[in-house]
Image: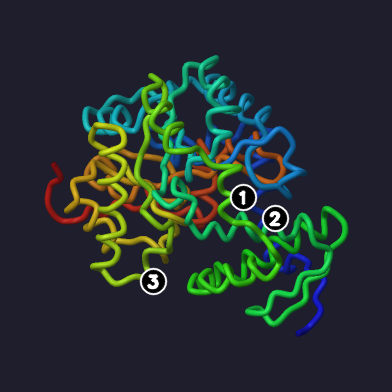
Amino acid sequence: MTPVVPGIPLKARIRASVLSGTARLLHGLGLDAVVGRRYGGSGVVLMFHEFVRDSAQTLGHGCRIDDFEAILAGLQRQGRAFVTLDEAQRRLETGDTRPFAALTFDDGYRSNVELALPVMERHGASATIFVPTDMLNRSVNAWWLGLRELALHHDRLAIEPMGQIIESRTRAEKAAALEHMTAWVWADFARAALLPDVFAAHGLDMPGLVDRLAMTTDEVKAIDRHPLVEIGAHTTTHRALALLAEADVEADIAANKTHLEALLGREVRWFAYPYGAPSISGTREAEILRRLGFHGAVTTEPGCLFPQHAQARWLWPRQNGEFAAHTVPQALSGAHGVFRALRSGWGEPAANTHPTSGPSS
C-alpha cells in the first residue's frame, strides 16, 4: 500500500475558499440580504447533525453550540419566525410572505437534546430530528463516525480498500485525512460497505461508538413529546438510496416509517434523504415517498423555499448550517440563498421545483 500524507486537493480548496469567502464578504457588507431579494424565497430549512462544545475534538465536524446560539439570534434579527415543517408548508400554500426558518437535525445524535435543545428553548425554536432505525438498534454502518474515530486516534492508518497508508499527526493533518477518506467514499458510495472490515481490523467497536453518540429508543420516544421537537424518518439503514433497486428503496423507507410510528404512536410525516445530494436522491425516491404517504421530504441541495415548493414538497432544498470555520456568517448568508446563487451561477433561484405526479394524502 502507498503511504499518503493527505492534504485537501488544490481545486477543492480553491472552490471552498471562494464560496466561503464570498458568503462571508456579502454577509459582512450586509449584501447577503440584497441577494436574498431574489434567492431568499419565503423561508429556509437549515440542516445540522451533531452539536459540540469544541469542534477540534471532532476534527471540525458538528456545529459548535455557541455558533448555534449565534445563528438562531441572527435569524431572529433577520425577522424570521421559527416554524415546523408543517407550518412552512402551510405558509407556502397560503401565500404567507412573513420570513421563516425551519430547523432540522439528521441522524438522532444525543447532543441534539443535551446541547441544542436548551438553546432552542431560549429562542422558542422548534426542530425536526430525522432518525434511522439502525441508529437506534446500533447496527448502522456509521462509516463517517468510524473514519473520524480512526483519524483521531491513529497517526498511521492502513486502509486496505483504498490501497493507502494514511499518515497524520497534527490536528490539521488529521482533519485533512478525514476529508480525504470521506471524499473517497463520496466518490462511490458502494465503498461504504467495505469499511466495517477496516474498522474491525483496527479494533473499533462501532456499536459502542454509536451508543456513545446517538439517542436510545427511549430517548427518542421521550423527546418526541417535547413541544419543540418532532421526530422524522431517515430510512432504516442510512444507505445511499440511488445504489438500491426501487423495491429495496421502498422497503428500507417503509420499514423505518412503520418502526417510528409504532414507537411514537403517531403518524410520521416528514423524511430526510441520507446524504441528500441530487445524484443520490431524485424523482424516483420522491415518488416512493409520495406513495408511502409522507407529507414531504428534505434534501441537501442548498437553497431557500419558494411558493412553488408547496407542490414540490418531496425534494425540498435545505441549507447546511454547520461549517468547519466561519459557521455563523456562512449559515446566515445561506439563509438568504447566497449558496444557491453561487452554485447556480446566479441562475434559477428556486431549486428542485418539479413536483412528482399526483397528490399526497
> Which residue sits at x=54%, y=57%?
142
Residue 269 visible = no
Which numbered disc covers residue 284?
Answer: none
Would residue 341 be found to the left or right of residue 232 on screen?
Answer: right
Q: Characterize the local packing of mark 2: few (<14), some (14-19) or many (20 or more) Cα atoms within 10 angstroms.
A: some
> Which residue sits at x=82%, y=55%?
172
Would residue 107 be found to the left or right of residue 19 on screen?
Answer: left
Circle 2 or circle 1, nearest the eye? 1
Residue 71 image position (x, y, % from top left)? 59, 28
Q: Nearer the viewer, residue 51 or 46?
A: 51
Residue 328 visible = yes
Circles 3 and 1, Cβ within 8 Å, touching? The answer is: no
Which numbered disc covers residue 149?
Answer: 2
Amino acid bearing label 2: Glu
Circle 3 or circle 1, nearest the eye? 1
Q: Nearer the viewer, residue 338 or 46?
A: 46
Q: Nearer the viewer, residue 331 or 18?
A: 331
Residue 103 image position (x, y, % from top left)? 46, 33
Which residue in the structure is indicated by mark 3?
A: 243
Q: Characterize the local packing of mark 1: few (<14), some (14-19) or many (20 or more) Cα atoms within 10 angstroms.
A: some
Helix, strand or loop at mark 3: helix
Tell me the CA gap for discs 2 and 1. 9 Å
Which residue in the structure is indicated by mark 1?
A: 209
Circles 2 and 1, Cβ within 8 Å, touching? The answer is: yes
Q: Nearer the viewer, residue 346 or 124?
A: 124
Q: Quadrant of residue 126?
A: top left
Q: Characterize the local packing of mark 3: few (<14), some (14-19) or many (20 or more) Cα atoms within 10 angstroms.
A: some
